[in-house]
Image (spheres, rainbow, N blue to C red):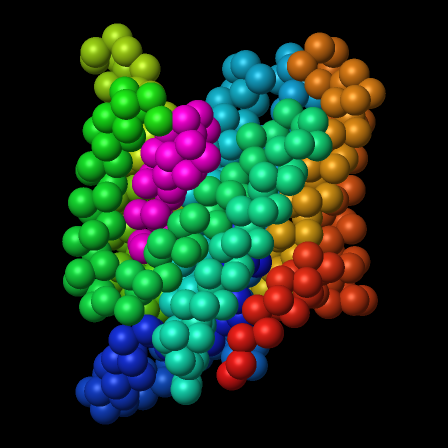
Amino acid sequence: MGGAAGAAADGPADGRWHEVRSRGARRRGRAYSRGMTATAPQLRHDRLVAPDVLRGVAVAAMLVAHAMPLVPSARTGVVGFLAWNVNDLASPLFALVMGMSAALVLARPGASPGRVLLRNAIRGAVLVALGVWLETWGSWIAIVLQYLGVVLVLGTPLLLLRSRTIAALAAVLALAAGPVNAAVAAAASGSPLALWLFTGPSYRATNLLPFFLLGALLLRHGAQRDRLLPVLAAVAVVAYPVRPLVALLLGVESPSGSLPDTLHDLGLVLLAYVAVVLSTTSRSPAVQRLLVPLRAIGTLALSVYVLQVALVAALARAGLGYSADTPLAALALVLGLCAAAVLWWRFLGAGPVERLTARLTGLVPR
């Protein structure tokens, strides 16, 4: 997840963004200055706000999805429909933000690609080890960390390629992932690596990697208000209903990881991205204040993830979940963790798991 992808920087991995912006400034003059003013709220020293807010949205979506077993009567109807969509949003959005963060680190002035690759390999190993450990805690959560760790290790080297090549790879992966996953599953490979790459019941690196690459491309373009945003919104509107339309027309549900399922997730992720970019580039002080909690939660994403697994495991041991409605427990899980994350961020800064990961990656010499 995003907390595993490193700190932010200000520019693209291919080094061309600053050049393009400079040419645009000469062409547009004052119009360019006004455009920069509109996007200025994103910047806080060397850190972009949009990835943190997107990560916060993913964490909030995850918490809501994982709290739904505490209110089983709400898993149908309108509330259930919204909850399932929130559930579908979380993991691909984490992958998208992780790609954005990795691209930011590579774009940092003076960044060494070799060191970035090594540090992200360490981060990926931490995610895999942590995910395997969390699976033993006895929660009802399908742990995603090990899959994201594999994506981080595989995806970071690809960000050294040109943007057009990355876009082509993302498209090919999105199209080929379903058939490849099915072929590997038919071969009955039971190794953990095959599970994380191809055959996981809830997640697979092959399905998350296109979102990682998409995040890097969006970062290179810049999280800004321009003509790309309505295009992304239109793609989202077209992509989202593909899965239910396939079910309606063919009478079969699209399996997890299939192309209709990926398009459904793409629609959700792009809608979230457009909404966050519109918010983070708003000049309204009220909107910026409303984003602070999401940014705080996103900054502590990995620590929040570990803590919620611990709490859900405790609730499961207490016999809660999937049987009777316990709305207070659900609210405590979602709102309590969000409040704790905001307070920790406000007074203590980075989360404990983020600090540990930073210490490990700091072993790589600069």
* 188 to 303, vertically: above or below: above
The x, y position of residue 293, in whole percent, is: 67, 56
The overriding secondary structure of the stretch rendered in magenta is helix
104 relative to 350 in the view: left or right: left
Residue at image position (28%, 23%) is 187
The x, y position of residue 167, in whole percent, is: 21, 56
| Viewer-nearest residue: 274 or 125 | 125
Residue at image position (79%, 58%) is 343
| Viewer-nearest residue: 194 or 201 | 194
Residue 291 lies in the magenta stretch: no
Res. 273 in view? no
The x, y position of residue 124, in whole percent, is: 49, 55
Residue 205 lies in the magenta stretch: yes
Res. 229 in view? yes
Residue at image position (74%, 29%) is 313
* 2 to 131, vertically: above or below: below
253 relative to 8 in the view: left or right: left
Magenta segment boundaries in residue numbering = 190-214
| Viewer-nearest residue: 44 or 172 | 172
* 333 to 234, vertically: above or below: above
